[in-house]
Amino acid sequence: MKYMLLISLSGLLFMLSCHHPQAVQNQGVPISPVNDYLEPHRPQFHFSPDSMWMNDPNGMVYYAGEYHLFYQFYPDSTVWGPMHWGHAVSEDLVHWEHLPIALYPDSIGLIFSGSAVVDWDNTSGFQQGEDPPMVAIFTYHNMEGERTEQNDFQTQGIAYSNDKGRTWTKYEGNPVIPNPGIRDFRDPKVFWHGGIQRWVMIFASGDRVRLYHSPDLKAWEEVSEFGAMEGGHGGVWECPDLFPLYVNGDSARVKWVMLVSLGSGGPNEGSGTQYFVGDFDGINFKNDHPAEDVLWLDYGKDNYAGVTYSDIPKEDNRRIFIGWMSNWQYATLIPTYPWRSAMTVPRTLELKETSEGLRLFTRPVDELASLRGPAKEFAADEVTDRLDLTSQVGSPQTSELILTMEWEDGHEGKVGLTLANGLNEHLDIGYDIAKQQLFIDRVEAGKKDFSDQFAGVHVAPLALENELALRIFIDWSSVEVFAEEGKVVMTETVFPNENFSSIAVFSEGGILSGIKGHAYGLKRIWGGATMNEGGESE
Ligand code: FRU
């Protein structure tokens, strides 16, 4: 239903005309952006499409020195419509090169979310030259079926590439998993399981995930399901992922983590992503936590449908995550043009033992340090109200801050940072000591009238004594806040009418005994160097 409501008139016209299985294919030549990436609110160091609508990251796979990022893309409008897979590649997870659309809708359906793998042993038989093929596994969504209220309009299909992802051929036997009559049946994530020598597919299906096996990526059989009675169920389950992680980096202790995005019912309402920690024997996933526990990957309102990279080399062994920096509550309404929405910075996921049990910690990838200008140290003691730090930090408009704050015993108020511009718009990132909550307040932070579900004070539970450690990435239209080494994360978009140019520390209702840290201006990743070394506008 969500998609029916979103589909635009141009989308309907497109579908009526789209009955050819082979829509025009490109030759995989990189595309130069048409736009300069300096429009108001344009992310400077995050991935965003040159123009038009984007949602979920798809097909994230590393191959031959390139990180591929495909994404849900509608090339004809800035709102959701008939889905294609847009495509970009990066050699460093920081700078991205746009490539032509990889997958077009065809007579079976639109191309919804999914994953990609390198088929190292050519189990699929798709290999043509010396090198193993890449295989993309995605959901076909048949609009005609949805319109006529059939239940079987989502199926799984595959496509392969023998030229490093530049061109893709859809498998003639598609769909590889027909729909057994289940309405929500989408978003396959596939990985090779060495223990059982099978490909494993996990995909979302309403209030649960389903797991399938295959020897060759073509023939699939259902083996298990998980989740109908576990975790959060405030909305339909989407975009799952399942992967092993070492506990505290110890290779002798492996646990499996399942990510599940929830279309609504997130931690601060709207979309959100939960995770489960447990064991997986190749067939069944067993949750370690009580069924009613809900663990959130990110408490901010703008990190959705995120999944992790496939085929990261063993020597690297990181579990690298990218999410879509938006929320279905208002994604189609955000005030940006000629594109809509961006991805989070790439992040690594790690499992650590905490006093509350095993928790997923999130950290921006180290490669982002290549964008840093010179470090600027800052410090202040005894803040009782507000203290401007701009002369020490510089303009925060594209920056990274690493800091700690300490407060005195008996402080029952709020402490934090305020980013502001000359129009009295401000975004507060802080900690409510009495409530033991990290918060982002974007009530007066800029444009908000596009949706009554956008502005607000959004919170994350975080028990602390007298000190808070923060790492914050600030771009023209987002903040990503990693608290306590990434134990609690909040990702939020923001649309100030002028970029934030000042930064202050505040302490309400008590004495902040000290703040200290360092800041880096971050260079932009698009176009020529219009930023100086410190990453600030010239
Ligand atoms: C998640 C999602 C997926 C679906 C895609 C369609 O945001 O709803 O479940 O495959 O978007 O664009």
Image: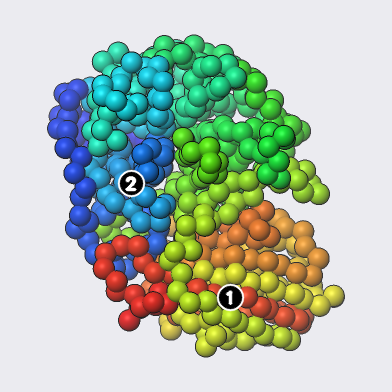
Seen in the image, is 352 located left or right of residue 118?
right
In-front residue for pair 169/512:
169
Seen in the image, is 71 located left or right of residue 190?
left
Please give the name of the residue rendered at 52% of the width and 51% of the height, measured from the top-left corner: 347
Seen in the image, is 252 located left or right of residue 317?
right
Q: Secondary structure at mark 2?
A: strand
Q: Residues within 10 Å of mark 2 (few under 14, many from 20)?
A: many
User: In the picture, residue 527 is in which quadrant?
Assistant: bottom left
Q: How is the image coloured?
A: rainbow
Which image quadrant: the N terminus?
A: top left
Q: Is residue 49 above or below residue 467?
A: above
Q: Secondary structure at mark 1?
A: strand
Whole-percent x, y for residue 191 in the image? 49, 27
Amino acid marked by disc 2: Val
Q: Is residue 224 above or below residue 307?
A: above
Amino acid marked by disc 1: His
Q: Which residue is mark 1?
A: 518
Whole-percent x, y for residue 6 in the image? 34, 41
Please give the name of the residue rendered at 37% of the width and 50% of the height, measured from the top-left corner: 91
In-front residue for pair 150/19:
19
Label 1 to label 2: alpha-carbon separation: 31 Å
Q: Which residue is mark 2?
A: 89
Q: Residues within 10 Å of mark 1 (few under 14, many from 20)?
A: some
Question: Extreme right residue here?
Answer: 410
Please give the name of the residue rendered at 47% of the width and 60% of the height, measured from the top-left corner: 368
In-front residue for pair 475/161:
161
Q: Is residue 101 above or below residue 382?
A: above
Q: How many marks?
A: 2
Sequence-wise first label, 1 or 2: 2
User: In the picture, residue 146 is in which quadrant?
Assistant: top left
Which image quadrant: the C terminus?
A: bottom left
